[in-house]
Amino acid sequence: MSTSPQYSEDDDDLYPILSKIEQPSDIRSLSEDELQDLAAEIRRRLIEVTSTNGGHLGPNLGVVELTMAMHRVFDTPTDKFVFDTSHQGYVHKLLTGRKNHTFDGVRKTGGLSGFLSRDESPHDAFGAGHAGTALSAALGMAAARDQLGTNEHVVALCGDAAFTCGITMEALNNVSAATKRLIIILNDNEWSIAKNVGAISKYLNELITNPIYNRLHHDFGAFLQKVPGGEQLLKLGKSAEKGWKSIMVPSSIFETYGVRYFGPIDGHDLPLLTHNLEFAKEADEPVILHVVTKKGKGYKPALDCPESFHGTSPFEIPSGKSKSKKTDIPPNYQDVFGKAMVRFAKANKKVVGIT
Ligand SMILES: Cc1ncc(C[n+]2csc(CCOP(=O)(O)OP(=O)(O)O)c2C)c(N)n1
Ligand SMILES: [Mg+2]
């Protein structure tokens, strides 16, 4: 792996496929083998640039196949992608003409933003930085599309942590009343910046591990054929599928909100992702695809320590060790604030009950 911080024309040899991707449609003509190689090239490029510039490495390593599949199936900028927070948008940048030389400048003064930005590319339908905003924004775009009578697809990519945000749940509450067509991708890697906690994270884990849901996912038809009476139900079409599903398993929380649930789906299986997204594209109702990914996929230090590599400072590639000496780094605002709050609380033990 080249450790050179600056990309030069010679580096095109190191990225034979990525260097030829000028726009998302370029990946649609690639063979299965070339797509696998492209995924590896993207991961190398992400590691190389963030090792110099710092950035959101772990989240991006986790969505390489997912972002590739999205661009294989949908057609931006006509179709709209809304990435929650958009810290995981580097792969999207690399596939939408911001590769190589330009990507060297990510998070640098005068360079690319570390988030998506409507000023930066027509492929960025929404610019965020705040967590939890994607579903609301996407729902607004879908409702506007319905009013205008246009036909584009709107796809919201939301992390599992987004579903712990009130604004996401508020949007979910409005989905079925506001539009008939919206594609939500739940990118479940079990992590926010730290490991996710609380009821939603437990619930998502239940969906992943419950064998009934596992059997029901992408090949529901094949499953129905094996159960008594399933053939007849299949003939009754989609409404029967829905009915049968609700008899067999408790409705997922998303179906309670009027959003049809599909999952869990292996988020690193490109053909499977493509198949499921093609299916979602045809759906005439709001759908959620529960995609399971590994934060830091393809880089051991990031897999071993997802929290440090959620957003990292520059690091040595072989070891993952930070390039900055501890003494170079000023204390974080939140650490100073937290320590001060604990000090004040201890001084007011009687009021807050701290020992
Ligand atoms: C309002 C707000 N609060 C907190 C943050 C800090 N933050 C950045 S990304 C993130 C969540 C990341 O988890 P998830 O959405 O599951 O995405 P992942 O990185 O796991 O792919 C948070 C809390 C933020 N950007 N905005
Ligand atoms: Mg997450």
Image (tube, rainbow, N blue to C red):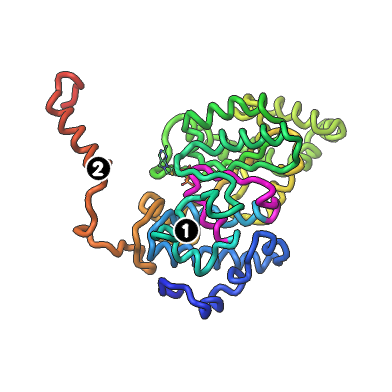
In which quarter of the view is residue 349 placed? Answer: top left
In which quarter of the view is residue 97 placed? Answer: bottom right
Q: Residues within 10 Å of mark 2 (few under 14, many from 20)?
A: few
Identify the residue shown where x is 55% and y is 76%.
12
> Sequence-wise, which precedes: disc 1 or disc 2?
1
Mark 2 Cβ inside 8 Å of ligand 1: no
Kind of residue sitting beneath label 2: Asp
What is the span of residues highlighted in magenta in the rendered image? 72-94
Give the distance between the C-alpha atoms of the residues marked 1 and 2, in whole angstroms.
28 Å
Kind of residue sitting beneath label 1: Leu
Left or right of 224, for residue 204: left
| Whole-percent x, y for residue 262 in the image | 66, 39
Residue at disc 2, secondary structure: helix
Q: Residues within 10 Å of mark 1 (few under 14, many from 20)?
A: some
The question of residue 92 being in magenta is answered with yes
* Residue 112's disc number: 1
| Whole-percent x, y for residue 176 in the image | 67, 26
The quadrant of the image that shows the C terminus is top left
Q: What is the residue that sits farthest to the top in this orientation?
A: 351
Left or right of 243, for residue 18: left
